[in-house]
Amino acid sequence: MATNRPTLWQYIAYSYGRRLPDSMRTWVSRDLAGDGAIRRHMIRVAIPPLLVLAPFWLIPASFYVHLEMTAPIYIWALLMSLALNKVWRRYRLAQHDIDPNLVDVIRRRKDAHIHEDYIRRY
């Protein structure tokens, strides 16, 4: 039975590195290279460090101590995932046997008028 969308358990496993069946390639390509792909990537990446750092808030201390313990680590994790989002999404596309250059489709669409202008001028 071919489905268009993964089930909840498939989606959770997929979100953290598991490969989906070949029947869902279209959905995977839209998820990793379509509109909102970076936002979805950042939401998925923001959850694990939050779960790891949450127990630190149970230690008896002031709000500022909790913030000083967890905020730098959490912010650093988010910044690194933002910096490496294109690399990760390319890897995930290749993992599903989809062209990794599909990640740049949105950028090419946005910059098409610049390239057309350049071609027209020169």
Image (spheres, rainbow, N blue to C red):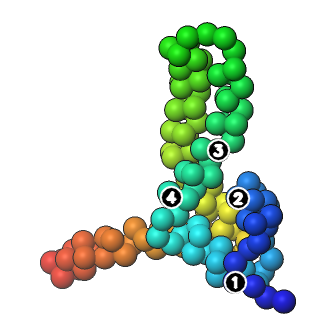
| Quadrant housing residue 120 | bottom left
Q: Earlier in the sequence, mark 4 or mark 3?
A: 4
Q: Which mark is residue 88?
A: none
Instruction: Say which quadrant the N terminus sits in.
Output: bottom right
Q: Residue at left 77%, top 72%?
A: 7
Mark 3 lies on a secondary structure that is helix
Q: Check the image and report above or below for 1 versus 46.
A: below
Q: Check the image and report above or below for 95 versus 70.
A: below
How far is the residue under mark 2 from the one under mark 4?
Answer: 13 Å
Residue 19 visible, this angle: no
Q: Which mark is residue 15?
A: 2
Please provide percent x and percent y for residue 64. Answer: 50, 14
**In terms of depth relative to the viewer, which is nearer, 49 or 79?**
49
Q: Earlier in the sequence, mark 4 or mark 1?
A: 1
The reply, left or right, for residue 119 in relation to residue 4 is left
Question: Please, what is the three-letter code of the amino acid marked with disc 4?
Answer: Ile
Q: Earlier in the sequence, mark 2 or mark 1?
A: 1
**In terms of depth relative to the viewer, which is nearer, 117 or 98?**
98
Question: Please, what is the three-letter code of the amino acid marked with disc 2?
Answer: Ser
Q: Residue at left 66%, top 36%?
A: 49
How far is the residue under mark 4 from the one under mark 1?
Answer: 21 Å
How far is the residue under mark 2 from the one under mark 1?
Answer: 16 Å
> Which of the two marks, 4 or 3, is nearer to us in this view?
3
